[in-house]
Image: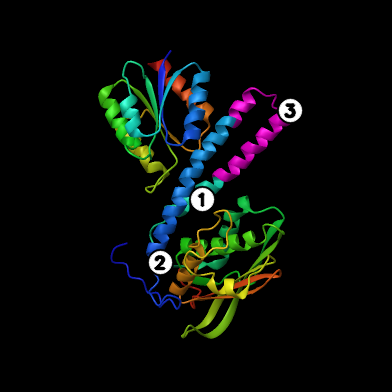
Amino acid sequence: MGGKKKTGQVNPQTSEQPDIESSARQYGRLAGGIAHDLNTILTTIYGYSEMALESLDETSEAGQSIHKIIRAADRARILSGRLMNLSLHTTYEKVNIRVRNIISEAVSFIKPSMPVKTEIVENIVAPDILVSADPVQLLRVFVNLAVNALQAMEETGGRLTITLEAVRKEDINHIPAAEYALIRFADTGQGMKEKTAERMFDPFFTTGKNGKGTGIGLTLVHDIISDLNGDIKVSSRVKKGTVIDVLIPAVADRMHKLTD
Amino acid sequence: MAGVMVVEDDPALRGLLKEALEKRKYVVITAGDGREALAKFRPSVVDLVITDLLMPEEDGLMVIMKIKEMKPSIKMIAISGGGKAGPGSYLLMANKLGADLVFPKPFLPSELVQKVKELLDKH
């Protein structure tokens, strides 16, 4: 990483230059630590499930229940593998990427752990739009925003719609660009009060109960988007839901080398 | 009966491996970290060591090196849930240091117990 300079703009909330690489490393360590502990716990779950099956008729009700436990553990193992992959990504390189692909990847990352009665709908209006970003960083942004939206619907159930479209906007944060990718995360969850919405990108601010959420995810989201000369807008209504708009300058030349 | 030492800092997994091995009639000695493992290790009693790699105090790589010194014929299985250098890299290192087998977590404990049997049968 040495020698690689960041070109991010000033973070309006802290008046400091966002240190994306350092945040990404911290995030990576956190993801790796969680995956490591999860793998250990899963081995115990598999082990006791196997032992229980040794003394049970596999076709009995209890035997079937144990099989369901093993299948759930299999899903957690997939999730843990993905977390580990995220943790290994320590370099930071902007390439031209199709936003649609990163949205699909984020959705498949989240699907195994979605709360019951929630669904995700992808509404891709601009399938070919490209942005210049680090793919894993962008994946982190989308995963964070989607997980937050799903958590807001955990008790009531609901739908998260992720829309991708191209918008023209003359001036975002004083940097003109002809075209932006607009990625909209609209949920039908419990919404937020104005004060909560104002603070949602502050470091260590979390509304997560029982230890859910560290309060660093959305700060990282904000910093990554700032670094891309993009913008995030939040609008929320209590008991109606939240809409988060992420705007990222589109790559003008669509013939530019593409990394999927 | 052959003796197996289980070195694992997670108490639940340590307990599970102890139970699974005792069911197969092995004499099992457990340790919660590398330092405890080195203190409890007796070359005349232990024929095979199963060690986690990322642990407080002395880590698993140190356990492999020091126990190999004490008993070169010892059989070693390294287990790991991954770490800062990646899930495979610690296990690769363990392999180079003399572990006979490596198991990335999560694994099926029945498969581990089967490998214990195979390694000790070769002994």
The residue under the point 48% across, 38% down is B105
- Please name whichever residue, A177 or A216, is drawn nearer the observer in this view of the structure: A216
Q: Position of residue A180 (x, y in %)?
A: 54, 78
Circle nearer the N terminus (2, 1): 2
Q: Position of residue A206 (x, y in %)?
A: 54, 63
- Please name whichever residue, A134 or B10, is drawn nearer the observer in this view of the structure: B10
Chain letter belonging to callout 3: A
Q: Tell me the number on the disc at residue B79.
A: none
Total marks shown come to 3
Q: Which residues are magenta?
A: A49-77
Q: In the visual, does B71 lie left or right of B91?
A: left
The residue under the point 69% across, 27% down is A58
Mark 2 lies on residue: A20
Q: Amino acid at mark 2?
A: Ile
Mark 3 lies on residue: A60
At numbered mark 2, what does the secondary structure look like: helix, strand or loop?
helix
- The answer to which image quadrant residue A59 occupies is top right
The residue under the point 48% across, 43% down is A37
Mark 1 lies on residue: A82
Disc 3 and disc 2 on one polypeptide chain: yes
Residue A119: say if magenta.
Answer: no
Circle nearer the N terminus (3, 2): 2
At numbered mark 3, what does the secondary structure look like: helix, strand or loop?
loop
